[in-house]
């Protein structure tokens, strides 16, 4: 299941033949070669439902990946229950539920659901999982507004509005959430959405602690305003000290790909890891390099958005 089929590249190859070579076979082969495994889940296989249903896996002593291939869902375990980070969306919610159970947890073990931001691919399963587990749902005020709006608007392809979680825990910059010896610290980093949430917490590798970060809005949206907010947010995120684990909210980011591979490339390395070798998800250098690249991309995006706004006047 983890080998990308690259249907998109094959379509490009067919187009090359129809266009009399204007798009050469070499270029089509190059396009096929460039799609990484994690990238395939947001690229050529984006709408392949069965392909997306990857097996869950343990990343740290207390952190599990339980989402589909294209959008992350993480389960953070503690002795007093679990915290779910995002929920995916339909048609993958039952897959998330099944994955939670496959890694050894019951739905009743979930005490909190933390939402990184209010886009449907991250929040679409929150209502069902909240109902099944009785968990509290956590988001920033600005994105609770967004969640309420999503729940009152037609769904994709003019389907009925998707079910949304009931407004529950509203957190703000500097708030913390503690459960079973684990503490999450929350930050507000707008730019992707007005209330994109960042959380820091501790993960353990064979008992050794590492400071992890979930950056809930790792790409600019919403024109000049969002573009400016994103650059400012990246600058603020960069000031959070001692981060060496990036808990990514997507397996792959098209705008600013993760340094040294996405989630699934790192999982392969994790499976092959030998005693004494470094953990492939632990890298302060990769995190800092990604911040540099994301900021540069954010600045370029902001310049483009300003130019578009000026041209529209």
Image (tube, rainbow, N blue to C red):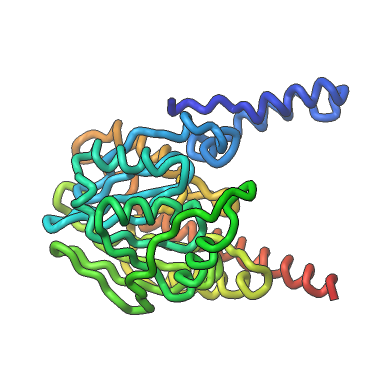
The residue positioned 20% from the left and 51% from the top of the image is: 108
In the foreground, 1 or 238: 1
Q: Tell me residue 162's x, y (percent).
A: 50, 54
Instruction: Judge whether residue 304 can be spotted in this image.
Output: yes
Residue 30 placement, left or right of 73: right
Total marks in image: 0
Q: Quadrant of the N terminus?
A: top left
Residue 168 placement, left or right of 183: right
Above or below: residue 215 compared with residue 36: below
Q: Tell me residue 202's x, y (percent).
A: 24, 61
Residue at the left extreme, as displayed = 79
Residue at the right extreme, as displayed = 20
On the image, which quarter does residue 181 sit in? bottom left
The residue positioned 19% from the left and 47% from the top of the image is: 61
Above or below: residue 251 compared with residue 1: below
In the foreground, 263 or 83: 83
On the image, which quarter does residue 20 sit in? top right
The residue positioned 56% from the left and 52% from the top of the image is: 160
Q: Tell me residue 25's x, y (percent).
A: 75, 23
Residue at the front extreme, as displayed = 160
The residue positioned 43% from the left and 53% from the top of the image is: 249
Residue 86 placement, left or right of 103: right
On the image, which quarter does residue 68 sit in? top left
Above or below: residue 225 compared with residue 158: below
Residue 43 placement, left or right of 122: right
Q: Quadrant of the C terminus?
A: bottom right
Q: Tell me residue 290's x, y (percent).
A: 49, 57
Instruction: Judge whether residue 204 can be spotted in this image.
Output: no
């Amino acid at each position: 299941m983890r080998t990308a089929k690259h249907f998109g590249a094959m379509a490009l190859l067919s187009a090359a033949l129809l266009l009399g070579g204007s798009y050469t076979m070499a270029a089509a082969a190059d396009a096929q070669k460039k799609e990484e495994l994690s990238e395939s889940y947001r690229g050529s296989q984006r709408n392949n439902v069965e392909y997306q249903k990857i097996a869950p896996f343990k990343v740290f002593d207390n952190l599990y990946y339980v989402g589909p291939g294209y959008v992350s869902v993480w389960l953070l375990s503690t002795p007093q229950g679990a915290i779910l980070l995002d929920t995916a969306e339909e048609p993958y919610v039952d897959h998330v539920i099944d994955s939670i159970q496959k890694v050894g947890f019951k739905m009743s073990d979930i005490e909190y659901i933390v939402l990184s931001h209010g886009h449907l691919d991250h929040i679409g399963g929150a209502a069902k999982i909240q109902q099944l587990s009785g968990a509290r749902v956590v988001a920033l005020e600005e994105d609770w507004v967004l969640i309420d709006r999503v729940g009152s608007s037609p769904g994709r392809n003019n389907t009925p509005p998707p079910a949304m979680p009931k407004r529950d825990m509203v957190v703000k910059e500097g708030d913390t959430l503690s459960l079973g010896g684990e503490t999450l610290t929350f930050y507000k980093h707008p730019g992707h959405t007005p209330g994109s949430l960042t959380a820091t917490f501790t993960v353990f590798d064979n008992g050794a602690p590492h400071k992890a970060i979930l950056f809930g809005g790792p790409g600019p949206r919403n024109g000049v305003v969002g573009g400016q907010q994103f650059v400012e947010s990246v600058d603020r995120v960069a000031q959070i000290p001692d981060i060496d684990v990036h808990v990514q909210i997507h397996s792959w980011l098209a705008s600013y790909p993760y340094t040294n591979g996405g989630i699934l490339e790192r999982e392969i390395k994790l499976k092959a890891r030998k005693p004494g070798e470094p953990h492939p998800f632990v890298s302060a250098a990769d995190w800092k390099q990604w911040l540099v690249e994301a900021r540069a991309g954010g600045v370029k995006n902001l310049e483009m958005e300003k130019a578009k706004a000026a041209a529209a006047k």
